[in-house]
Image (tube, helix red, strand yellow):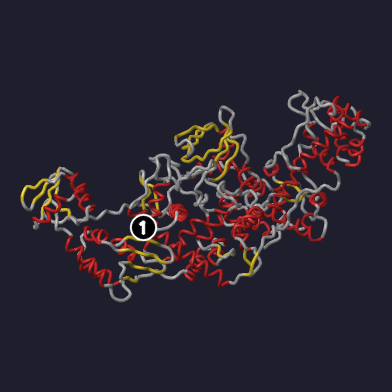
Amino acid sequence: MPHVLNRGALIGKHNGSTLATWLSGLDLAALEHVLTARSDALHPPQPRSFGELADRLQRPGAVYSAVAGLTRPQLQVAEALAALGPAPRTTLAALLGATGPQSERELDAVLEALANRALVWPDDAQQLRMAAPLRDAWDHPLGLDAPLAQLVADATSEELRKMLVALGVPSPGTTKKQRLTALLAHHADPKRLTAVLDSAPEATRELLHQRARHHTELTPALHADSAHRGARWALERGLLVQDRYQYGPARMPSEVAFALRGPDWRAPFTAAPPLIPTVPVTAREVNGEATAAATAFAAQAASVLTVCSAHPPTLLKSGGVGSRELSRIAKAAQCDAIAVRLVLETAYAAGLLARDGSDVVASSAYDAWAQNEPAEQLTALLRAWRTLPLAPSQDRDEDGRTRPALAGSPPCTGCVQARDALLTACARLPAGQAANEPTALGQLVTWYRPQAHPLPQDTTPFATMVREAELLGVIARGALSPIGAAVRDDNDQALLTACLDLLPTATRTARFGADLTAVVTGTPSASLATLLDSVADRESGGTASLWRFAPATVRRALDAGRGAEGITSDLASVAVGDLPQPLTYLIHDTARGHGRVRVTSAASVLHSAEPALLTEVMAHRKLTSLALRRLAPTVLISPAPLDKTLAALRDAGYFPGAEDTDGTLRIERSALRRVASSVPPPRAPSRRHHSRADTKAPPPPGDAGRLAAALRATPSTALHAGSMTHAEELVAGHASLLSLADVRQLTHAITENHAVTIDYVAASGRRTVRTISELDLDPPYLYAWCHLREDDRVFALSRIRGVLPD
């Protein structure tokens, strides 16, 4: 891996204080590494100069996305630098307590990682600088308020003179700049500042130390009341600063807080991840448990989607699949609700399910997926799980209420980061070691991704995420399985290979028992599952599935137009050995009774060649609601509809056959619904219903190597080189708040008909973030389709503050 920033680089030959200048001084390999880490810079239109690249890398949205992937020590170093402002590495190391050889190496590694993301870089004065949006990520970095220069920026020259007099510092001149320079120099000297603090009255020292203690606890800054009996002495000397219009409480400059904390105070720096209890584990043990878990989940997924294919779940009016439907699917598929949620969310993301009105229906891609081997089926679901912007098995919201599945919740980037951190934490465990308790892995997640938050339902951090990984076979016995390693590397081919190695092929045979059951070990093939589902009821699933035969289940197959001989022949073709005699007797006995009573619509007419059978039907207590009346020895009539009559007869233990108007038995076969969608639809409607067919999909990011070579070919004196096109000049003339990079991004979206996200200030003054598409430029306005409002909107170019690719 190229070393973009090491200790030598921090004190080396970088010239200039801007990010553009630092970027232009990197060699080709280092620049390519930065572009790879910050792939947002590769989206079209690609930057044409280092200045434009620097603008892109420092956009707030791009910086916040990069910050989401930082570890705890990286965030701690960034926060410390945000508190210090531009500072040399030695000052930063002293604040963090990184003064020993090992600590220095750890600090250099963190600084290099931040530089790789263009978040922190050195200038020619050996000062470490950081992207402005990163500094703004903390209101009070290290619990500190703003520095003195910012707090006294509005003070008058006379007010500054009075502070110098109170401090006993001679005024170097009569201008505000001279007096401000002297005051800042005094507060920048810890020894002089400490001497002043030591001479303060007791009430003042108590007040200031109270503030410093609160800061040390890293709580939000507590503002001192200027009316406090000890505040006036501090206000006169700039130890506290009051707004000149007396608006708000007095504030403590960061220099004063540092002096009060003393030279021995250190900012937190947790360079190494926490240690968790581990136990020895072999690859064979991990693979064995991963195989069992992945095989069970693959079978459950096939079962759940088979149920959803035949009987699509109905969505709640408020959206999502509710608990009642989830329970129905879980009962029919013989698995628990967590597995159902996990299958529904991953299958939806993989494009196997899609919304169709008020139902969730199998898509046209499902039928092809169902014919695949279990390893291929699981691979598709694992790919979807890897980037799923939610926790599929989350069943409770923040208020403790039941959360529907497929509810269309807003994307959660923290869930993706937590999943990535979990996989990384497992991969970093010592070789041959595994977590003693898998839930302890949550402690490592908070170190690798401190900005990822556990779910409200988690009693231990990230327990839900760990449980999902175990169900999928990603984690086994507290360690990363080969499947998990391929998921972490985001390598589709390696993932398929791992699944093929660990999962058995689909089972195409069943063992039939004399107790009228059929047992299938492993994952049944689609054809076997369809056959058994048509003639028996599934009672359990997982590593082994159980079906049970009964007269009613056989009758279901007969109603679908199949004969006893055909059913027996089909079952015998998949049986291990001969069919048990009780099963063949059941099939033929049920077939003999099937259709002895026939029902046709009149409302309902029952007829049979056996008058005694009709007499028995009329006398049956369960059939009194049908109000049967005899018209002839072989004919009965009922005012009840055909379907109700059939249901009542079947409930009473008879096997009636429905008859068409031409006298033939009606075949009861439900048609399977499919949605013609081979890719997953959006979570929520993001375009108008009559969207234009000519809207283009966003192009893929470019190549980091080619862009690095093109930028290196740019003359070093032309950091901001590159003339604008006529369209860019037109946009830039009205969008005065946008940088060159944002102007080019917006113009590209207009000319290429791509969606884009804008930071917009409404007429009311409220800032909002909108994703827009189908852009139509009519200066000084921009007409576009707003995905948030789902309507056409007009945006003033002068109110757009930032642009990001969608």
Residue 245, horizontal then vertical, whole percent: 76, 23
Residue 700, horizontal then vertical, whole percent: 52, 53
Camera-side residue of 169 and 395: 395
What residue is rendered at 12% in x and 53% in y? 614
Camera-side residue of 265 and 379: 265
Residue situated furthest bottom in the rendering: 577
Camera-side residue of 278 and 416: 278
Q: Is residue 211 shown left or right of residue 721? A: right
In the rendered image, the quadrant that contains the N terminus is bottom right
Q: Is residue 411 shown left or right of residue 739? A: left
Asked whether the viewer can see residue 163, the reply is yes
Residue situated furthest left in the rendering: 632
Residue 253, horizontal then vertical, whole percent: 80, 36
**Helix or strand or loop: what does disc 1 sit on?**
helix
Q: Residues within 10 Å of mark 1 (few under 14, many from 20)?
A: many
- Looking at the rendered structure, the kind of residue marked 1 is Thr
Residue 100, horizontal then vertical, whole percent: 82, 58
The number of numbered badges drawn on the structure is 1
Q: In terms of image quadrants, where is residue 792?
A: top left
Q: Is residue 142 above or below residue 378?
A: above
Camera-side residue of 615 and 161: 615
Residue at the disc numbered 1 = 306
Asked whether the viewer can see residue 365, the reply is no
Q: Is residue 552 above or below residue 220?
A: below
Q: Is residue 448 shown left or right of residue 256? A: left
